[in-house]
């Protein structure tokens, strides 16, 4: 009897232990959702401007930054600004089913619709105070941001740089598909028409449109201009089904083949002129073959093969990989393993080109490119190219049968499972969290929220306010704090607190991944 009684007691204790553990798990899930709501309500109610966001704010919200400092009436479009927040809200809505996150995404979409230009595209940022305020920003902060040449002048056109326009259009497509709300359809249709109109007949896109007589009219691969527009059109075809997207998609894919250089330099440039010759852009971007762009374009060609099964996209990949092998840097120039390749390679010689700068601002600063590796300008200095990864991916594709290669192609209308179409098409593309999602990490993230619902951070990239020297009348350098020669950005060394959109997104993605893993 004693043994039986002991067994009963052990079973009861075990049941209590298991139940207590389950209770703690339920409490953890509840604490996660509560933390998410608190943090999001602060961002929506206190941080956002008309539902949209900058990149970084001081803790008292008195100053804000995109890449450069911004007016209080301005919001940044590209991630991790407004688009990063909007996509996160939709992902949170999918995982939690909480209507609050959908309504937060609606606010983002409404801000983007407000900021859409008459042409159908978007500028780098939206200024809710209008063009007069935007032009004042360019005359002061933008004009004096040494090294940020894309912001020296207000051109009055839309940009594809860093997927600004294609990213905004893609988010409106997501919003429309989520509930088929017709309120978002006019702006979406306008954006689609703009991207189709701005495509060159050969398949590429300029950096900005309508066209201006400067480098922004070049065919531009740099910063995902062509890739971003192409992927958006593929998203439209996969979700809306219109055959009118097929010809622009095919021409854009073929443009990658057209612009690969011949032997002995079978790589790609970042920009091409009207004659399809490599072209220069900003002062530190010479006409050159670019190793990083070559790497990106090889990956795109492999993606096109997965989309189409067309082996033309694989034909010259070995040539490009062999060229990347050929221009590897010697050990003496790898900067302790921080780079494997030069960023720019001289046309015709395969010699590395290195960018330099001197001075302290737009009035006395200058840039030049030469063969000297001393005092390098930071742009593209630490270039690491995964050549072995490219080889492995290429060989793996060759080994697969065509039907297996293309089985997940978004171009296979009618063959894609319904669970992967419509609003679910984007849900399956949600980025993975950056870091661990174990219990201890989740508790630390929750614990990090302050009494107002903020995740505060320190040591962020900032700049000094714009000022004018009383004696000379010259404006101050408004670029991010950086080393005078290398232009490497310097983090704020003080203990000042900031509200970072990137930190909020990172923490939210970890919490969402934790919730998703428990379903």
Image: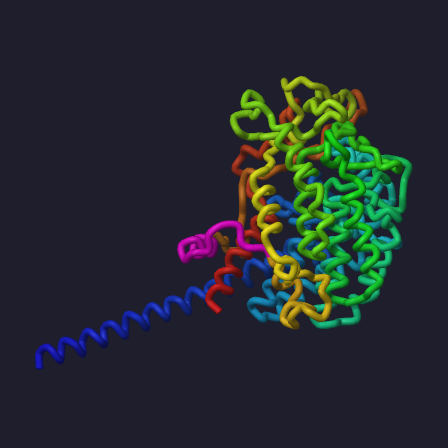
Q: Is residue 132 magenta?
A: no
**Camera-nearest residue between 440 and 456:** 440
110, above or below 18, in the image: above
**Camera-nearest residue between 282 and 324:** 324
Q: Is residue 445 magenta?
A: yes
**Location of residue 83 (image quadrant):** bottom right
Q: Quadrant of the N terminus?
A: bottom left
Residue at 16% from the left image edge and 76% from the top image edge: 7
**Camera-nearest residue between 316 and 120:** 316
Q: x, y (%) of residue 190?
A: 85, 60
Farthest left residue in view: 2
**Location of residue 146 (image quadrant):** top right
Residue at 36% from the left image edge and 70% from the top image edge: 22
**Position of residue 26 in the picture relative to residue 99 (left or right):** left
Residue at 70% from the left image edge and 25% from the top image edge: 350
- Count of labels in the image: 0
Q: x, y (%) of residue 211?
A: 89, 43
Residue at 72% from the left image edge and 71% from the top image edge: 414
**Camera-nearest residue between 338 and 76:** 338
Q: Which residues are magenta?
A: 431-447
Colouring rule applied to residues: rainbow
Q: x, y (%) of residue 210?
A: 89, 46
**Location of residue 256 (image quadrant):** top right
Do we see residue 76 in this rendering?
no
Do we see residue 291 in this rendering?
yes
Q: x, y (%) of residue 35?
A: 51, 61
């Amino acid at each position: 009897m004693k043994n039986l009684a002991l067994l009963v007691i052990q079973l009861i204790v075990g049941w209590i232990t298991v139940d207590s553990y389950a209770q703690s798990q339920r409490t953890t899930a509840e604490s996660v959702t509560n933390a998410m709501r608190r943090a999001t309500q602060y961002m929506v109610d206190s941080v956002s401007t008309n539902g949209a966001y900058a990149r970084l704010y001081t803790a008292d919200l008195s100053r804000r930054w995109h890449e450069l400092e911004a007016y209080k009436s301005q919001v940044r479009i590209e991630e991790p600004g407004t688009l990063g927040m909007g996509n996160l809200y939709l992902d949170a809505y999918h995982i939690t089913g909480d209507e609050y996150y959908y309504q937060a995404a609606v606010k983002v979409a409404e801000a983007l619709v407000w900021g859409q230009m008459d042409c159908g595209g978007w500028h780098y940022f939206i200024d809710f105070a209008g063009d007069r305020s935007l032009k004042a920003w360019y005359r002061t902060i933008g004009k004096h941001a040494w090294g940020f040449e894309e912001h020296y002048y207000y051109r009055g056109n839309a940009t594809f740089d860093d997927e600004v326009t294609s990213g905004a259009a893609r988010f409106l497509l997501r919003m429309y598909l989520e509930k088929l709300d017709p309120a978002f359809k006019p702006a979406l249709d306008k954006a689609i028409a703009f991207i189709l109109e701005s495509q060159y007949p050969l398949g590429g896109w300029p950096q900005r449109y309508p066209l201006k007589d400067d480098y922004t009219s070049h065919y531009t691969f740099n910063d995902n201009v062509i890739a971003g527009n192409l992927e958006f059109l593929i998203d439209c075809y996969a979700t809306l089904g219109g055959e009118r997207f097929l010809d622009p998609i095919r021409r854009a894919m073929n443009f990658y083949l057209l612009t690969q250089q011949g032997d002995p330099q079978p790589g790609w440039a970042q920009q091409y002129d009207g004659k399809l010759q490599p072209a220069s852009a900003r002062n530190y971007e010479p006409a050159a073959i670019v190793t990083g762009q070559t790497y990106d374009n090889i990956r795109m060609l492999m993606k096109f093969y997965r989309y189409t099964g067309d082996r033309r996209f694989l034909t010259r990949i070995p040539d490009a990989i062999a060229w990347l092998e050929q221009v590897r840097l010697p050990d003496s120039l790898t900067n302790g393993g921080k780079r494997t390749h030069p960023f720019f390679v001289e046309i015709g010689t395969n010699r590395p080109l290195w960018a330099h700068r001197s001075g302290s601002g737009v009035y006395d600063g200058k840039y030049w490119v030469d063969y000297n590796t001393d005092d390098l300008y930071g742009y593209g200095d630490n270039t690491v190219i995964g050549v072995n990864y490219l080889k492995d991916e290429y060989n793996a594709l060759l080994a697969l049968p065509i039907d297996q290669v293309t089985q997940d192609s978004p171009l296979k209308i009618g063959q894609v499972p319904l669970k992967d179409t419509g609003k679910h098409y984007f849900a399956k593309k949600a980025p993975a969290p950056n870091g661990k999602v174990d219990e201890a990490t989740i508790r630390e993230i929750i614990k990090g929220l302050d009494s107002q619902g903020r995740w505060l951070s320190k040591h962020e990239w900032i700049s000094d306010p714009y000022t004018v020297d009383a004696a000379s009348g010259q404006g101050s350098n408004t670029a991010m704090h950086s080393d005078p020669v290398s232009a490497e950005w310097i983090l704020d060394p003080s203990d000042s607190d900031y509200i970072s959109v990137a930190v909020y997104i990172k923490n939210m993605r970890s919490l969402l991944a934790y919730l998703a893993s428990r379903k």
